[in-house]
Image (cartoon, helix red, strand yellow):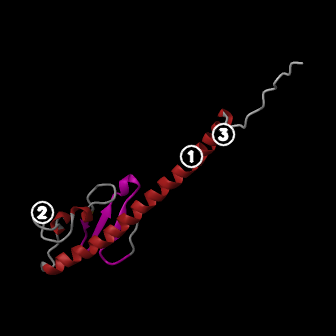
């Protein structure tokens, strides 16, 4: 008699298309949840950096006024290192995290505020009287 060979099943290799699509869908859902969280953390970090920068510049302006017989600087660029200014700061030190220059606003009695527009999220303000930095 003739015997007929029955084909044996070989071991399965790789993944099916359905399995791959499920994995991709899970990755997309996880990435969709992670992106807004990451963006919020980056926004908060920029705000914290701007608050710190405002506070630092208050000290720099006070130092400038001490060295120049209480003459206030009209522009923060004078705090830059030579040849741009008379101070020791780099351009990054007077630029907020959104790429805008910090601003100085003078009040009566040599009181002033250093502020940043916070990239449109509000205004971050550091008073010269040593009070807390306010902002969004």
> Which numbered disc, 1 or 2, marks the residue that appears first in the sequence?
1
What residue is disc 3 on?
22
- Residue 111 in magenta stretch: yes
- Give the alpha-carbon distance from disc 1 to disc 2, as whole Å: 45 Å
Coordinates of residue 61 in the picture (x, y in percent): 22, 73
SS under mark 2: loop
Q: Residue at x 45, y 61 (%)?
A: 44
SS under mark 1: helix
Query: Residue reaching furthest top?
Result: 1
In the rendered image, is residue 66 in sight?
Answer: yes
Q: Report crowding for label 3: few under 14, some 14 to 19, many 20 or more residues within 10 A (C-alpha).
A: few
What residue is disc 2 on?
84
Q: Residue at x 40, y 62 (%)?
A: 47
Q: Residue at x 25, y 70 (%)?
A: 107
Is residue 34 or residue 54 the one in the foreground?
Answer: 34
Residue 64 location, quadrant: bottom left
Q: Nearer the viewer, mark 3 or mark 2?
A: 3
Query: Residue reaching furthest left?
Result: 83
Residue 72 location, quadrant: bottom left
Coordinates of residue 11 in the picture (x, y in percent): 72, 37
Coordinates of residue 86 in the picture (x, y in percent): 12, 70
> Which numbered disc, 3 or 1, marks the residue that appears first in the sequence?
3
What residue is disc 1 on?
32
**Vertically, is 47 above or below 15?**
below
Q: Is residue 125 left or right of residue 37?
A: left
Please identify the quadrant where the N terminus is shown. Answer: top right
Q: Is residue 16 left or right of residue 104?
A: right
């Amino acid at each position: 008699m003739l015997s007929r060979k029955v084909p044996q099943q070989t071991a399965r290799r790789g993944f099916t298309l359905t399995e791959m699509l499920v994995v991709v869908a899970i990755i997309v859902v996880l990435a969709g949840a992670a992106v807004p969280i990451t963006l919020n953390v980056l926004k908060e970090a920029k705000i914290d950096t701007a608050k710190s920068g405002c506070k630092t510049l208050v000290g720099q302006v006070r130092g400038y006024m001490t060295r120049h017989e209480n003459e206030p600087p009209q522009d923060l660029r004078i705090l830059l290192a030579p040849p741009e200014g008379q101070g020791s700061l780099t351009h990054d030190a007077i630029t907020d995290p959104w790429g805008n220059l910090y601003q100085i606003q003078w009040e009566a009695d040599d009181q002033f505020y250093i502020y940043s527009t916070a990239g449109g999220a509000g205004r971050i303000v550091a008073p010269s009287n040593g009070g807390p930095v306010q902002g969004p």
